[in-house]
Amino acid sequence: MKRIFLLLVAILLVLPAFVTTVVAEAAPQVSVAQRELKKDKNYRSSDLYARAHHIIYGSKAPLGPGGRIRIGVVINGDENMVVEDRVKNAIYSAIRKKFPREEFAVMKATDLNTALMQKAEEQYAQYKMRAESATSVETIKPGSVVTSNTAPNTATAVEKQDSLDADGMRVLNQPRGIVDLLCQDYVQAGRECGYDYVLALTLSVGGVNVRESNILVSGNMFNNSIRANGWMRIRFVDVAGGKYLYRNDIATMGHTHNGFVNGRVYESSVRKAIKEAMNDIEVTED
């Protein structure tokens, strides 16, 4: 009986350490999901394939066969455009067509977007400190440099205008986003997240023109003609080369007769812009 008692005591002493070890080993890991662009809008990937991929390549590897070129896609900009699924679907459709899944792993790069937003946050903090460190700083346009009245010419302080971003575009009721970053910021973030190319698209609303019609269609709705301009600012960065492969600001016009401005007119504008951008980029075989 004494031996049984001693054995039970030993088990009780060892068991907590064993349970703690097991729990520690089984602790869940939190990371940003790797989301590859679907083959098409309605494509559903296999859960079995995803589990097998995780076992073979780990959580940081791109989905799909190894050896493919990784492109990180980030879309941001005016809320009226980015909230429209039809706008984003038009972009994704053009990208799918340009970069075949067999050779390219085109990713909805949440990890890349996080890294870029962190750099934008740090940049804004630096601008703020520089402005506060100067006793007198005059208001300037983005991209200009101001010399403090009290500091030597080698010391500079830059003040960001809240109403304009780095391209001189209006910042309305949405975050500034990542457009104030420089090429090297995109290169560094791409390297940190393991992408071969970074494709950042910033969408901005331009002028809107409504041409009233005297023709009554139904009820109180007139067949007004709506023309809405849109800007697509494209940064396509070669991470290995450390430079822009393609950098452009494309303005296009969307057109509809539905009587008011909605997602259809923005989709029309964006579809034209992304088509022009993809036509400007050439994919060749080695």
Image (cartoon, helix red, strand yellow):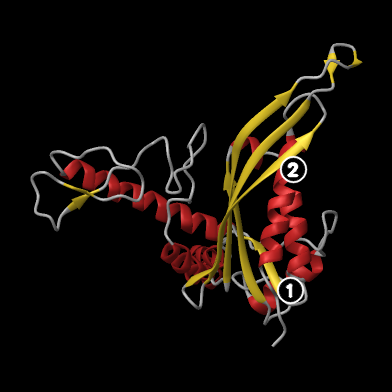
Compared across the picture, whether 117 is left or right of 142 comes to right
Rendered residue at 35%/51% (across/down): 143
Q: Quadrant of the C terminus?
A: bottom right
Residue 219 point in image, percent of width and height: 89, 12
Compared across the picture, whether 84 is left or right of 185 comes to right
Q: Residue furthest bottom?
A: 286
The answer to whether 256 is drawn above or below residue 1 in the figure is: above
Q: Amino acid at mark 2?
A: Glu
> 77 or 256, which lies in front?
256
Query: Can residue 88 be seen?
Result: no
Label 1: how many residues lie within 10 Å, few (<14), some (14-19) or many (20+)?
Answer: some
Residue picked out by circle 1: 64
Label 2: how many residues lie within 10 Å, few (<14), some (14-19) or many (20+)?
Answer: many
Residue 255, image quadrant:
top right
The answer to whether 173 is drawn above or below residue 215 in the figure is: below
Residue picked out by circle 2: 267
Rendered residue at 41%/51% (across/down): 120
> 144 or 80, which lies in front?
144
Q: CA distance from mark 2 to mark 1?
A: 30 Å
Residue 73 point in image, percent of width and height: 62, 60
Question: On residue 175, which mark appears?
Answer: none
> 284 or 21, which lies in front?
284
Q: Residue furthest right?
A: 218
Q: Residue furthest top?
A: 220
